[in-house]
Image (cartoon, rainbow, N blue to C red):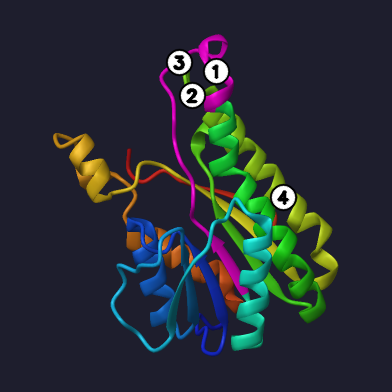
Amino acid sequence: MLSLNLEGKVVIVTGASGALGVAVTKAFLEAGARVVGVDRLPRSKSPDHPGLTHVAVALEDFAAVDQLVKDVMLTRGRIDAVVHLVGGFAGGLRLEDTGDDVWDKMFAVNLRPAIHLARAVIPVMRTAKRGAFLAIGSPAALDPTPNVGAYAAAKAGLISLVKTIAVENRDRQIRANIIAPGTLDSHANRTADPEHDFTRWVQLPNLASLLVWLVSDAGSEVTGAVLPLPGRE
């Protein structure tokens, strides 16, 4: 049986202080990984843990992301996985009514940080001949609904990016996958929709466990996949 033990592995988690980020960080630490949690602001909502380091990085700045990768290599000596959780949503307008500001924001938040991470970390992984690149997508990228055109297009671009990473790096045992979850059971979503049956939403520990599995030896044969996680809706 292939192991889910990540002892000794180094994992970069972006958006580490968000609701999903805290759950994902916890899951990777429990699996034995050393986690570098990345957020825009220098704070962490995760409990103190000897395996956790928290850093503030502006992911829209390639030079800052490149320096992050160099710093992790200097202090940890390896990078086994990037788990990219950062994203943002805007909607409510038809395509023809959506201005350039919204399009620019959706691509800046949902696609450009992932491009910067890939450009910085893939050369390191190719040298090591191992690695995993994971991202969080959206069902809207696969089956768009009205009035979310910019968001859906940015997430579709993220899917294409992840698949490109997978196909370009099979020769170096680098895997890349993207999960497209439904509504997450988070405090923010509960506040926005307090009458909903929260048990039908995607549970954060379950999504976190799937990400751990994809990084582990047990998930070593999965690459280039878009994995839907709809919850029980």
Mark 4, residue position? 163
CB atoms of marks 4 and 3 within 8 Å: no
- Spatial CA span between label 2 and label 1: 12 Å
Residue drawn 39% across the image and 89% down it: 50
The stretch drawn in magenta includes residue 89: yes
CB atoms of marks 2 and 4 within 8 Å: no
Residue drawn 41% across the image and 19% down it: 92
The numbered dot on residue 93 is 3
Q: Disc 4 or disc 3, which is closer to the eye? A: 3
Residue drawn 57% across the image and 55% down it: 59
Mark 2, residue position? 148
Q: Is residue 233 left or right of residue 118?
A: left
Mark 1, residue position? 99
Q: Amino acid at mark 4?
A: Lys
Q: Disc 3 or disc 1, which is closer to the eye? A: 1
Camera-nearest residue between 1 and 191:
191
On the image, the x and y values in percent for residue 27 come to: 39, 73
Q: 194 above or below 173?
A: above
The numbered dot on residue 218 is none
- Spatial CA span between label 4 and label 3: 29 Å
- Spatial CA span between label 1 and label 4: 29 Å
The crowding category of the residue bearing disc 4, from other C-alpha atoms within 10 Å (few below 14, some 14 to 19, many at least 20), is some
